[in-house]
Amino acid sequence: MVADYKIEHWTSSCSAVGSTKDSAIPISVNNQAATRQAIIDALLRKGHKLIERSSWHAKPPRNMLTPTSWDYRDIVIHHAGHSYTCAVSERGAIEQIQKAQEYDMRKFYDIGYHYAVSCSGDLLEARDIRYTGSHVAGDNTGKVGIVLLENLAEAGEAWQQEYSRKSLWEKLSGSLDIARDATAFNQATPTREQIDALSALIAALLEYFNVTALGGHREYQLLAPGNEGRACPGRFGMQVVKEMRAKFGLGTPSK
Ligand SMILES: [Zn+2]
């Protein structure tokens, strides 16, 4: 079901004698706010509580975010990367999303993704779904961003997917990152709880948006302007992507 309806109620303006429909006050139901809530309710019915922004004490956006076109067609899967390890509790998951928001807000007005899923299967609201995300460089229109809160890449993947394509200068300025990538030891594999929570989230999103494709950040980044490489969401994240595509019958990313 695509929730693109708009409901308008008209008051009868009966307080003024001789008034017409033109003097009535139109009230529009904010469909996007209702849909955001409906996704939260759908998750709860499936046994998954979404930890809302207010519950993890999200910082307010630094500036006005761009309202979305509300035409979400793609789901993009990310991993949080090298500096994250699996959280085993809700408290740990909250600390991770706070850290991710702080990092993203150095560059963007708010956390870039829309939802996050921890290793222990906690689901968290990230950027409000009513606003366009900042998670695929140069091409965020119509894309829901979901981040898995751990490192799902093997050592050397950032080099293979990202830096080997770059100029010598970019390689030099990224040398610390390259060294960290070459020696990464905290690589995790997704847990069953995490996959179950992610599945419930995707199912809820499919109830409200006409999503046709799902992919990993690296797949979408190659299609975006600039044709840049990205390691995200790592080899193990890409296994999750393939599993979710098959499970929900979704297509691969395309322009
Ligand atoms: Zn990513």
Image (cartoon, helix red, strand yellow):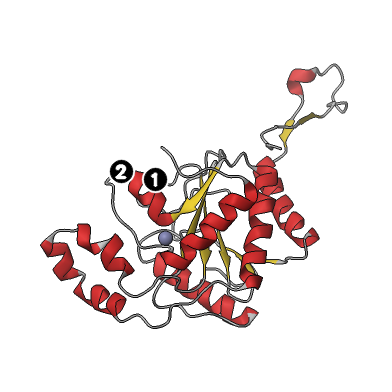
Q: Is residue 184 above or below residue 130?
A: below
Q: Quadrant of residue 201?
A: bottom right
Q: CA distance from mark 1 to mark 2?
A: 7 Å
Is the CB of the residue bearing disc 2 within 8 angstroms of ligand 1? no
Q: Dots 1 and 2: beta carbons under 8 Å?
A: yes
Q: Is residue 35 left or right of residue 118?
A: right
Q: Is residue 103 above or below residue 247?
A: below
Q: Is residue 189 left or right of residue 198?
A: left
- Secondary structure under tag 1 reads loop
Q: Residues within 10 Å of mark 2 (few under 14, many from 20)?
A: few
Q: Is residue 116 left or right of residue 12?
A: left
The residue positioned 66% from the left and 34% from the top of the image is 4
Give the residue number, with chain letter if any, for mark 1: 139
In the image, residue 11 lies at what x, y percent?
A: 82, 29
In the image, residue 79 lies at what x, y percent?
A: 46, 66
In the image, residue 205 lies at what x, y percent?
A: 65, 49
Residue 51 visible in the shown view: no
